[in-house]
Amino acid sequence: MPAIDNPKPHVIPEGDNATPLEVVGATASDKLIIIMVGLPGTGKTHVSRRIARYISFFHDIPSKIFNVGDYRREMYGAKMPASFYDHHNEENVAKRRETCDKALSDLVAYMKQDGVRLAIYDATNSTAESRAKVLKRLADEKIGVKKMFMEVICDDDKFLEENIRAVQASTPDYKDVDPEEALEDFRERRKNYMSVYTEVQDHEGSYVKIMNFKKFIIHDVRGYLPLKVVHFTMNLHTMPRTFYLTRHGQSEYNLVGKIGGDSGLTSNGLEYAKRLAKYASEVIGTNEVIKDGKVVKTSQPARLWTSTLIRTKETAQFIKHETFVGEEHDNGDKVVSWVNFRPNARRNLDELYAGTCDGMTYEEIEEEYPEEFAARQNDKLKYRYPRGESYMDVTLRLEPLAHDIERTREPILIVGHQGIHRILYSYLMGMSRAEAPFVRIPLNHVIILKPHAYGCTEERVCLMPKHEMVCDGQDEPVTSMPVKGNKKASTLTKSISDPVMDAPSC
């Protein structure tokens, strides 16, 4: 390579593996405070957590929720009766005000730190007076940042009943309490707030109103980060949903330890595809309902996403596509027909591209490109393959998919790849991006994730144990690239000892 006379080079902070600015929080320039408004049981906490998760994970902007309920539980205990929220009880009003002040003080300290950041003040803020006090406190503290009210309104009786039951089931306030007793107490709590509640008005400032998660009113919202939040929020809902993540069946490249490529499935991979089809029909596409006092299994709408690569399409090839008539679309509209598990191949879901290392084994990479091999050992998250991608690059292209994940109501079966599922799993499970490259996503497993307001539950189902895989007489490949001196990696991958089930992909 010819010598270049460049005594004053343009040096970027990210170094040789330049990460897109959008995914390292360098696009936004303003801090933002979101002040939640709404009666109990409308889904405020769920919305708060989804926004904070999305902004912190996909945009690397520090985000923190200051939930007044958490402060109240810490200061006065979790199991407070509905009478604690009686606005005529001066003693309890003073206690609740104290919890609000403590949360607000911590928020102020957080926002005084340097750098772009997002704070969410999660409380009912049910009166114009209480909202004005919040704004005055911020002004007195000279917190001159963008502020936006986000009001969640629910006046659909059926939707409200479902939401209240979901909130009651997941909130720490009613742990180990009889469900019906808890439900009645929660309704009484809500009535106490309804007696004083007033909606946000135009003169109070910038706001977004979410009405039954179907209608959105946006007033005087400006700026990159606020509008990014608004766009994402318009995809949210509080209905229960389930995600099924699975890698493709064993591929020809898996068998010999090659990464990347676009190979087809082995005989073992085809067997897994058949078992996955059976699981999709009997579990994912089936719902249990009570009819005439008996549990009856009925078909339910479900979605199927794959990448555009051959191995994921072949894994999904045996899944049946039943047609429903008169089903509801995910926005509530009636549709003439619904094709269950309709194949939807998305390039966003393609595996991390290994560039010039595509189709090589880790041993070959170490031999041919020792410097690249060492660089990836040192920083697996940001390392970019020559002419290829990094985990940060893939995170950027998965960001639009997060909107669809939040929007959908039906169960989604995602037949993807190791690197892709590591990122999606980490996003839904509340893990950091730094942990994502080391999450274990074995072959022949379905990972079942069910997000809720206070977290996400996980279950793993193995459809094809290793001992049932056909022996082909070949040696097991070297499948995991060692990671140098990374405590998080050793913690997350300490159970990895199976070169077949943990076959490499990226």
Image (spheres, helix red, strand yellow):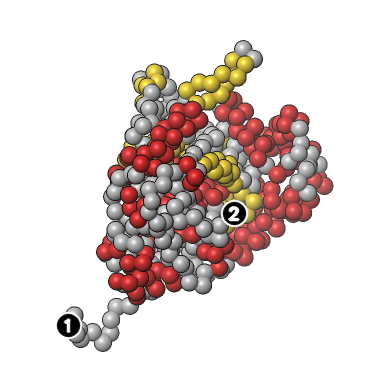
List x then y, in percent, for residue 227.
Answer: 42, 50
Circle 2: residue type? Ile
- Percent x, y for residue 248? 39, 44
The residue tagged 2 is 65
Can you say whether 68 is above or below 299 in the image?
Answer: below
Mark 2 is surrounded, within 10 Å at the Cα level, by few (under 14), some (14 to 19) or many (20 or more) other residues, namely many
Q: Quadrant of the N terminus?
A: bottom left
Q: Is residue 33 above or below residue 237?
A: below
Disc number at residue 377? none
Mark 1 surroundings: few (<14), some (14-19) or many (≥20) residues within 10 A: few
x%, y% of residue 114? 52, 70
Residue at image x 49%, y 39%? 463
Measuring from the top left, give residue 458's x and y in whole percent.
57, 44
**Residue 249 horizontal side relative to residue 445, left or right:** left
Residue at the spot x=59%, y=64% of the render? 110
Secondary structure under the numbered disc 2 in the rendered image: strand
User: Given the image, on which type of amino acid does mark 1 rest?
Assistant: Pro
* Residue that appears at 32% across and 40% down: 313
